[in-house]
């Protein structure tokens, strides 16, 4: 894991994973904060170093080392 970030509305947690080079998405329970796996997607490169969600929440930008 290289980075964690919540969506603006705090309904989702995004986690970048080095080695498998993806972003995992977890849904956050509004009731108790419990995380449930939702999906994952490739970072489009190798060894993600940083990512950011745009202020509008529409885009997630990833910087890979390789």
Image (cartoon, grey):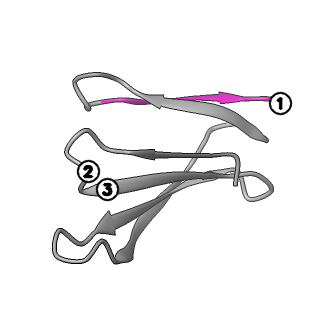
- At label 2, counting other C-alpha atoms closer than 10 Å, the crowd grade (few under 14, some 14-19, many 20 or more) is few
> Quick check: 65 left or right of 27?
right
Residue 23 placed where, x, y %? 55, 51
Asked if residue 11 lies left or right of residue 44, the reply is left
- Main SS class of the magenta portion in the image: strand
Residue at point 25%, 38% (across, down): 8
On screen, residue 2 versus residue 52, left or right, reads right
Residue occupied by mark 1:
66
Count of residue discs: 3
Of labels 2 and 1, the one closer to you: 2
Residue lying at 19% horizontally and 45% vertically, measured from the top left: 9
Residues at marks 2 and 3 touching, judged by CB atoms closer than 8 Å: yes
Magenta range is 59-66
Name which quarter of the figure residue 3 lies in: top right
Q: Secondary structure at mark 1?
A: loop
Q: Badge 2 is on which residue? A: 10
Q: Which label's residue is closer to the chain start, 2 or 1?
A: 2
Q: Which one is earlier in the sequence, the residue at label 1 or at label 3?
A: 3
Determine which of the numbered discs, if any, sits on residue 12 in the image: 3
Front tag of 1 and 3: 3
Residue farthest along the top direction in this orientation: 55
Rounded to the nearest whole Å, what is the CA distance between mark 2 and mark 1?
30 Å
């Amino acid at each position: 894991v290289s980075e964690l970030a919540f969506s603006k509305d705090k309904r989702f947690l995004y986690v970048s994973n080095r080695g498998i080079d993806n972003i995992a998405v977890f849904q956050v329970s509004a009731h108790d904060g419990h995380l449930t796996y939702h999906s994952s997607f490739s970072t489009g490169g190798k060894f993600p170093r940083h990512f950011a969600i745009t202020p509008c929440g529409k885009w997630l930008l990833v910087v890979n080392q390789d």
